[in-house]
């Protein structure tokens, strides 16, 4: 039956006619075909009487499918694994990543298991590099299958796995447990594999826990109902060919609403939380050694330790794919972006060794004569060690006499392990004067605090708060490792319509204030005494900080300037001949007569039109020049905004985001509510490790090159990435394009060199090297894709594109490219299967959920209900985000608290970001790296409420509760410890927002449930999958 | 009666006026033949300890175009209680207060010995008196220290109610806010950009928020008698002393081979602007202390490259001084603004090299300010001169007067050609104004912002009679002077200042024959008035100015500053 069904099945869109049998209720085109796909197995189920199909057989069939999918993945070998094929084959194919042979075996054994979510990690470590590609085995299937397994798998060698496999194999039992969601059952089996191919139906049906396996459902579970229903939902979205992406989705969603929907089991579609958990289970806590070229690192969410053995840690560089296609044709064909997200100053955990410092004395670092690449492990020494060939440009260079060393029998230098630059992926050189501005050693950087003392900041109490905080904060300025005290100088400016500079020279009895009212042409009125050492001038500075709030206490000046303030900072740094950072605490749109005056251009009527992009475009002219000035002086701008209304954040944030700075925004700031949050941001921002006056250059081996850079950077030419400053949280996403053909043998090498000034005023060169594989097989590429990095790239490029293109175009491009990437996989790598089947590469199986989430982010959603500033704000913050941040932002962590065990220290496992995961009686914590919500269900047990909030019931909870009482009970303690551990990991602080179910603020919370339909437009995860699937099918026909 | 000479001498002593001819030619023709013009040297505030101040207002001629003051030369009809104006012959009623008038009971202004008389009028609101110090900080520490001490000392010489302000400059200009607690504030301006009064007002935050128009009556400044920048000495004494004490040399580095950047032009402009928008038409003194030439911005006299020397006399003569014209224009504009508001600009230049006084001379010249040159602020020359500025009379009043206007009326036979001296024209046309200008002409009223007892102007007249009149007639020249004089609070008067009107009524005969004129010539006057005329350009052509009369010397400000010897040199040249 099922097979027939497949055959018969018309393409998705067409489905309607065929649908007949299915509930018509869903959208027009019910996905019969799709089902068919999946389903062969499911169909059987569905159509047949509920129980009809013998469990076994059913089981088998799904399995096969699973198997098939994997095969598809393997592009090369396993061409066709029809359904009927033996499971084994599929398995092998599945195992995209390299597994040790032993594991392979085991996998095969288990063949039945379909998808392998988490297998990946195992493989890398275990398998020899070479073997990896060839034997993809291990796959995930096993994991998926079971839960039994992941942990076990991880630790244990092949055999154990074997064991586990069998377990899962057993059709009946396994699925059932998993399948808690009955509906899914039937159809889904297909999808199961998270890994590669998702059957359309499959995904839905799969039980969540299963992971990949989720899809496979036991026949038993399948109920007739399920089947029909499923189609409906899918069909709905699919059917409605919506023109506008966003618009369309909602439509689809509504359709979804129909009865059948219930049946769909969201658990069956690939789950991000599951993928994360699996990866953590498999690779968590392990040592990741970077000695293998093209090795795919663990996910960013996984807790692992890196051992640098020749390639940069993924903390510094993370690629969208660790195997580059050999030719540009291939690259074009698959449309998978080739990019690296570089976070050059990323903090590394204490468990990993800090970067080694290399000092080559007066000659400076050794570099290739032609391409100027720095000495690195990829350089090939020859001629007895007298010469070396540059791995990047192939130029043969002489080895300087002082650097000469004999080679061993392997042709390696004898001192390889004594020299970091020959054995490590990341290291630092001490730069010589040639690398300094004007050939002068740099001065230590300066931090200038510029406080808006206009009426609103005074009234909100912000000025007092900042001044109080600075008194203690300045003791914690960043300093060179091992240095006793910080050499960073500090300066103070207050401003409203005019600027007030302060002379705080230690010799003065009292500070001197100098007012500059000529804001048209900014200058710094004093030289000596503006930038001082805090410890020396402590008395004067404290005196000043005491006086500032009082001095302006009676102000009624509400107008402010902005560009001149930044200009003043630049001029001050110029006068002091140093680089530095401006901390600007600003409240309102700068309307005072001065350069850079802004007007309100928040015209919501533009939303959803072709001119919407203008809302996000910064004003040019003055601000453009400002960026140039800042960058050339090494002046980083950090902007703390306290707006009560529109302030043209798109323009104001332009300077920070081109100078390596950050923007912080506290709307309607109130000291009681947001004070702590702001102070904690400020502290982190002041204290965090940072480098100034930086220039980054990414060099690549021949055949490809870096073409585009996204991040808080300024580009004067096409190759040099200039950053006034770069801190440990700023990442630059670099896109690569082919110049020529890459060779599989040599692979693709890249070297990122960052020249910067440390907080101690030393000039350094930080070098990160990374080597990738190259392959003529697309399947290799798909296998080594990194979804988190991909989405980071897409987010940044979409956010950039939205400045120049209508949002609708941007969204269309995103969807199209998603479909294209997946279609290409389907076409070239997956084994043939019915067109109605959605097949996803294992490494990208959760890509759609991220992509969908990206399109639902505020900047990309066209809704006039959203504050323009808020959208611009999010757009700007994402531009400099690293992979960790985008991952979390696009797929927040939803942590159930009501079920947590108060005994263990562990943070409870996150659940999927969907409304369906919420329970009325539960309490959930949601964090996305920017905000933190504590959602309390309506029927949350009073004792829990009591122990968390110290109120007898929810009704007693104040509406805008934003802090948790410090209570002495295990729940409260545990919750606070969870929150504080989360906050510690993030670069910015998050205010806890307590949200009661059905309360008004719940809207904000709901926006974060990325698997659901967007509140302001945007499809649910499932709708999106369907839509993408339809696109894919169109591409394939 | 003594001789004619003695009589003249007596008159001169009494009135402070000396004529070149004490008997005037009877016609224009004769006047031109006599070469030496009909003129007078005029010292408005000549000290007259014996002169009783009159505590009421002068009686004016009722004709609107005349407004002459009742004087001894007027014909008075005691019976009818009428008087006839000696200029326009208008008959006027005496005011009611003069009801008791009679031949034996004459008011002072009708007594012949009071041909000069001083009225003290207390009309209008009190006028604050301001002293604004404009201090260059680009100088050697030793110099600066001496200057700081002099300035601190001067605070004690100022009347406690006088307003005082401080502007310092170097590369930038700082306008110091006074009387701040806990923190010292100043407004800073860059030295390369000139600001007009309105901009300055905004930048200093001096715009009055409410009713800017309302208070701006002709009465002058309104209620706020001080602002953040100009405050009473008694209030900010300590604060300012500390501030001056903390003054540091301009901190901006001066690289080798460069002059320090000295923004004198803009500093002065800001000083003028500050007073202009806060205390227009009141007495104020901008005291500028410079240690070198302006080297940047408007008003720069020389660039900051040391290798290019400052312009020399030869450069000026050959019109080769690069910045001269621009700078002169800048300072001229400033001087005009200051004088229009009745403010004085003093320049105390202490340096071994030139300081650009040539370009700045009009600042002192137009406003009646002092120009003092010395080698260093650490010399007694400067210190004592500076102290003398604050010299007081016996009664404790300063010997300086502010914001004066000078008005001259003549009888019909003569007209006024102009004035040479520390004055600017008020452009008051009238029937007695001649078309032939000498010096500052075309007006019968001048503003003299700063006057002290030695200030002397030269006034030129033209005889307009076309035909010789064979009658010996007396002609009157009537002069009114308005000065504002400050009297110290130590005096009984609570008024910080008062307006005084000084009237001088003079009369000379017309000669039937030219010889009579020659007999009456006053040699000294004839000579002294020549240098005054040097400033009038047409005169310069006729008398080749001796080279040693350089620009740096300030001829013509007051007759006393010119040595007789020099005058004779000039005269002898004329003879030749």
Image (cartoon, rainbow, N blue to C red):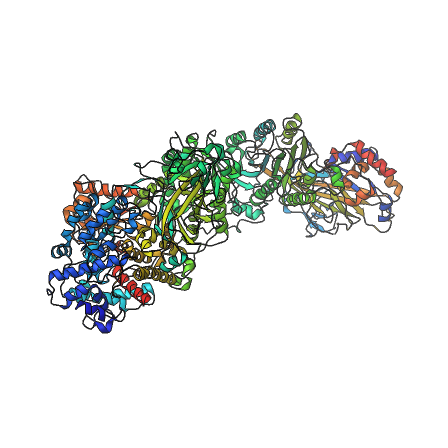
Which quarter of the rendering shows the C terminus of chain B? top right
Question: Which of these two is toward me, A853 or A591?
Answer: A853
Q: Answer above or below: position of A442 versus A922.
A: above
Q: Quadrant of residue B347?
A: top right
Relative horizontal placement of residue A197, taking residue A660 as reference (left or right): left
Q: In the displayed image of the protein, which residue is found farthest to the top?
A: B380
**Can see residue B183?**
no
Across and down, in percent, residue B509 comes to: 82, 42
Question: Which of these two is toward me, B304 or A19?
Answer: A19
Across and down, in percent, residue A104 comes to: 22, 50
Q: Answer above or below: position of A201 versus A24.
A: above
Which quarter of the rendering shows the N terminus of chain B? top right
Across and down, in percent, residue A871 comes to: 36, 55
Q: Quadrant of residue A376?
A: top left
**Can see residue A710?**
yes
Relative horizontal placement of residue B269, taking residue A797 as reference (left or right): right
Task: Give the total of numbered labels.
Answer: 0
Question: Which of these two is toward me, A767 or A80?
Answer: A80
Across and down, in percent, residue B518 comes to: 87, 39
Q: Answer above or below: position of A231 versus A411.
A: below
């Amino acid at each position: 039956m099922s097979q027939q069904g497949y055959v018969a099945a018309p393409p998705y869109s067409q489905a309607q006619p065929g649908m007949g049998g299915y509930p018509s209720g869903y959208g027009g085109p019910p996905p019969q075909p799709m089902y068919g796909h999946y389903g062969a197995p499911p169909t059987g189920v569905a159509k047949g009487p509920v129980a009809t199909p013998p469990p076994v057989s059913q089981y088998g069939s799904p399995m096969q499918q699973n198997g098939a999918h994997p095969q598809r993945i393997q592009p090369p070998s396993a061409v066709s694994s029809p359904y009927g094929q033996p499971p084994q084959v599929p398995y092998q194919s599945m195992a995209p990543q390299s597994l040790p042979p032993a594991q392979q075996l085991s996998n095969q054994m288990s063949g039945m298991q379909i998808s392998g979510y988490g297998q990946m990690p195992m493989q890398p470590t275990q398998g020899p590099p070479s073997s990896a590609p060839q034997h993809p085995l291990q796959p995930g299937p096993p994991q998926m299958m079971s839960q039994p397994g992941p942990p076990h798998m991880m630790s244990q060698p092949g055999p154990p796995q074997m064991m586990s496999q069998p377990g899962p194999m057993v059709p009946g039992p396994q699925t059932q447990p998993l399948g808690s969601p009955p509906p899914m059952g039937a159809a889904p089996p297909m999808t199961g594999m998270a890994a590669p191919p998702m059957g359309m139906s499959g995904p839905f049906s799969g039980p969540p826990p299963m992971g990949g396996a989720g899809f496979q459902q036991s026949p038993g579970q399948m109920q007739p109902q399920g089947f029909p229903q499923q189609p409906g939902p899918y069909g709905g979205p699919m059917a409605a060919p919506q023109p506008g992406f966003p618009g369309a989705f909602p439509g689809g969603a509504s359709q979804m609403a129909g009865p059948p929907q219930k049946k769909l089991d969201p658990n069956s579609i690939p789950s991000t939380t599951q993928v994360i958990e699996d990866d953590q289970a498999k690779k968590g806590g392990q040592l990741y050694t970077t000695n293998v070229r093209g090795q795919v690192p663990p996910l960013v969410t996984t807790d692992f330790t890196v051992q640098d053995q020749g390639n940069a840690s993924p903390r510094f560089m993370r690629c969208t794919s660790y195997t580059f296609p050999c030719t540009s044709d291939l690259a074009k064909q698959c449309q998978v972006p080739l990019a690296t997200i570089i976070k050059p100053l990323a903090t590394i955990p204490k468990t990993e060794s800090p970067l080694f410092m290399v000092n080559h004395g007066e000659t400076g670092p050794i570099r290739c004569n032609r391409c100027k690449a720095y000495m690195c492990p990829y350089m090939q020494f020859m001629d007895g060690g007298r010469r070396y060939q540059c791995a990047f440009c192939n130029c043969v260079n002489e080895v300087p006499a002082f650097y000469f060393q004999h080679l061993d029998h392997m042709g390696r230098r004898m001192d390889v392990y004594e020299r970091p630059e020959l054995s490590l992926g990341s290291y630092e050189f001490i730069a010589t004067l040639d690398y300094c501005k004007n050939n002068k050693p740099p001065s230590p950087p300066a931090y200038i605090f510029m406080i808006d003392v206009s009426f609103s900041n005074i009234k909100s109490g912000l000025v007092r708060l900042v001044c109080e905080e600075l008194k203690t904060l300045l003791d914690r300025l960043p300093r060179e490792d091992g240095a006793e005290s910080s050499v960073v100088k500090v300066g103070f400016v207050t401003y409203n319509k005019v600027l007030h500079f302060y002379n705080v020279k230690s010799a003065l009895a009292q500070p001197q204030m100098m007012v500059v009212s000529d804001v048209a042409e900014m200058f710094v009125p004093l030289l000596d005494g503006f930038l001082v050492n805090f410890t020396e001038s402590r008395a004067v500075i404290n005196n000043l900080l005491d006086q500032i709030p009082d001095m302006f206490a009676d102000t009624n000046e509400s107008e402010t300037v902005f560009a001149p303030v930044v200009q003043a900072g630049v001029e001050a740094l110029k006068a002091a001949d140093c680089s530095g950072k401006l901390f600007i605490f600003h409240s309102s749109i700068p309307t005072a007569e001065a350069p850079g005056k802004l007007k309100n251009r928040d015209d919501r009527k533009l939303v959803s039109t072709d001119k919407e992009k203008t809302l996000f475009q910064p004003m040019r002219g003055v601000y453009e020049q400002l960026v140039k000035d800042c960058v050339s002086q090494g002046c980083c701008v950090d902007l703390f905004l306290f707006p009560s209304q529109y302030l043209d954040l798109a323009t104001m944030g332009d300077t920070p985001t081109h100078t390596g700075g950050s923007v912080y925004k506290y709307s309607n700031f109130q000291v009681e509510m947001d004070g702590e949050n702001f102070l904690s941001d400020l502290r982190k921002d002041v204290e965090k490790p940072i480098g100034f006056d930086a220039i980054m250059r990414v060099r690549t081996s021949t055949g490809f090159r870096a073409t585009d850079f996204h991040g808080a950077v300024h580009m004067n030419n096409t190759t040099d990435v200039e950053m006034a400053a770069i801190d440990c949280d700023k990442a630059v996403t670099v896109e690569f394009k082919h110049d020529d053909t890459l060779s599989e043998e040599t692979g693709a090498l890249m070297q990122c060199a960052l020249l910067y000034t440390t907080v101690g005023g030393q000039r350094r060169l930080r070098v990160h090297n990374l080597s990738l594989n190259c392959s003529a097989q697309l399947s290799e590429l798909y296998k080594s894709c990194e979804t988190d990095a991909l989405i980071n790239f897409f987010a940044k490029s979409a956010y950039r594109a939205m400045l120049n293109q209508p949002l609708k175009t941007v969204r269309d491009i995103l969807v199209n490219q998603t479909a294209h990437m997946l279609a290409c996989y389907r076409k070239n790598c997956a084994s043939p299967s019915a067109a109605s089947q959605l097949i996803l590469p294992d490494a990208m199986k959760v890509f759609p959920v991220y992509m969908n989430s990206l399109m639902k982010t505020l900047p990309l959603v066209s809704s006039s209900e959203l504050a323009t500033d808020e959208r611009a704000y999010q757009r700007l913050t994402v531009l400099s985000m690293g992979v960790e941040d985008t991952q979390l932002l696009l797929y927040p962590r939803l942590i159930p608290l009501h079920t947590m065990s108060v005994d263990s220290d562990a943070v409870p496992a996150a659940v999927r970001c969907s409304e369906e995961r919420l329970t009325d009686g539960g309490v959930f914590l949601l964090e996305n790296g920017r905000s933190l919500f504590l959602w309390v269900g309506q029927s949350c047990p009073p004792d829990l409420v009591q122990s968390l909030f110290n109120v007898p019931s929810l009704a007693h909870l104040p509406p805008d509760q934003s802090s948790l009482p410090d209570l002495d009970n295990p729940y409260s303690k545990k919750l606070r410890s969870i929150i504080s551990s989360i906050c510690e990991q993030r670069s910015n602080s998050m205010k806890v927002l307590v949200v009661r179910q059905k309360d008004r603020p719940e809207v904000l919370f709901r926006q974060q449930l990325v698997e659901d339909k967007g509140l302001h437009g945007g499809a649910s995860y499932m709708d999106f999958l369907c839509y993408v699937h339809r696109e894919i099918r169109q591409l394939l026909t | 009666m003594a001789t004619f000479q003695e009589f003249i001498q007596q008159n001169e002593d009494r009135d402070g006026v000396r004529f070149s001819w004490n008997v005037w030619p009877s016609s224009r023709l004769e006047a031109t033949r006599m070469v030496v013009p009909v003129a007078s040297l005029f010292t408005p505030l000549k000290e007259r300890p014996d002169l009783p101040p009159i505590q009421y207002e002068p009686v004016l001629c009722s004709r609107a175009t005349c407004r002459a003051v009742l004087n001894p030369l007027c014909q008075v009809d005691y019976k009818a209680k009428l008087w006839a104006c000696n200029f326009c012959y208008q008959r006027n009623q005496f005011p009611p207060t003069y009801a008791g008038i009679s031949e034996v009971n004459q008011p002072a202004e009708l007594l012949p010995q009071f041909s000069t008389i001083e009225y003290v009028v207390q009309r209008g609101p009190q006028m604050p008196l301001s002293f604004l110090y404009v201090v260059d900080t680009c100088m050697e520490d030793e110099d600066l220290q001496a200057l700081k001490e002099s300035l601190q000392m001067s605070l004690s010489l100022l009347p406690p109610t006088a307003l005082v302000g401080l502007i310092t400059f170097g590369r930038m200009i700082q306008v110091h806010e006074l009387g701040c607690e806990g923190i010292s504030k100043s407004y800073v301006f860059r030295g390369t950009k000139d600001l007009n009064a309105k901009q300055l007002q905004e930048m200093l935050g001096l715009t009055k928020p409410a009713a800017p128009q309302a208070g701006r009556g002709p009465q002058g400044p309104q209620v706020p008698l001080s602002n953040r920048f100009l405050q009473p000495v008694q209030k900010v004494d300590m604060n300012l002393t500390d501030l001056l004490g903390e003054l540091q040399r301009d901190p901006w580095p001066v690289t080798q081979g460069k002059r320090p950047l000295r923004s004198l032009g803009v500093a002065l402009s800001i000083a003028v602007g500050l007073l202009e928008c806060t205390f227009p038409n009141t007495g104020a003194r901008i005291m500028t202390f410079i240690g070198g030439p302006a080297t940047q911005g408007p008003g720069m006299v020389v660039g900051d490259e040391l290798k290019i020397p400052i312009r020399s006399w030869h450069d000026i003569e050959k019109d080769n001084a690069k910045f001269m014209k621009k700078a002169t224009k800048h300072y001229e504009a400033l001087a005009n603004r200051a004088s229009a508001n009745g403010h004085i600009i003093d320049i105390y230049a202490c340096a071994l090299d030139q300081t650009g006084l040539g370009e700045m001379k009009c600042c002192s010249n137009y406003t009646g300010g002092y120009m003092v040159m010395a080698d260093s602020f650490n010399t007694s020359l400067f210190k004592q001169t500076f102290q003398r500025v604050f010299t007081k009379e016996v009664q404790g009043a300063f010997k300086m007067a502010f914001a004066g206007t000078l008005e001259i009326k003549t009888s019909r036979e003569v007209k006024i050609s102009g004035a040479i001296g520390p004055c600017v024209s008020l452009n008051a046309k009238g029937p007695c104004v001649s078309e032939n200008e000498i010096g500052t002409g075309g007006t019968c009223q001048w503003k003299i912002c700063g006057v002290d007892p030695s200030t002397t102007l030269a006034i030129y007249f033209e005889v307009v009679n076309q035909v010789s009149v064979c009658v010996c007639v007396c002609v009157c020249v009537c002069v009114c002077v308005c000065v504002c004089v400050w009297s110290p609070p130590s005096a009984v008067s609570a008024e910080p200042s008062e307006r005084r009107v000084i009237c001088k009524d003079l009369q000379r005969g017309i000669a039937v024959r030219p010889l009579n004129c020659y007999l009456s010539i006053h040699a000294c006057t004839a000579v002294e008035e020549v240098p005054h005329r040097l400033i009038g350009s047409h005169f310069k052509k006729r008398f080749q100015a001796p080279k040693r009369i350089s620009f740096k010397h300030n001829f013509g400000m007051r007759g006393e500053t010119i040595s007789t010897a020099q005058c004779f040199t000039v005269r002898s040249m004329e003879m030749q």
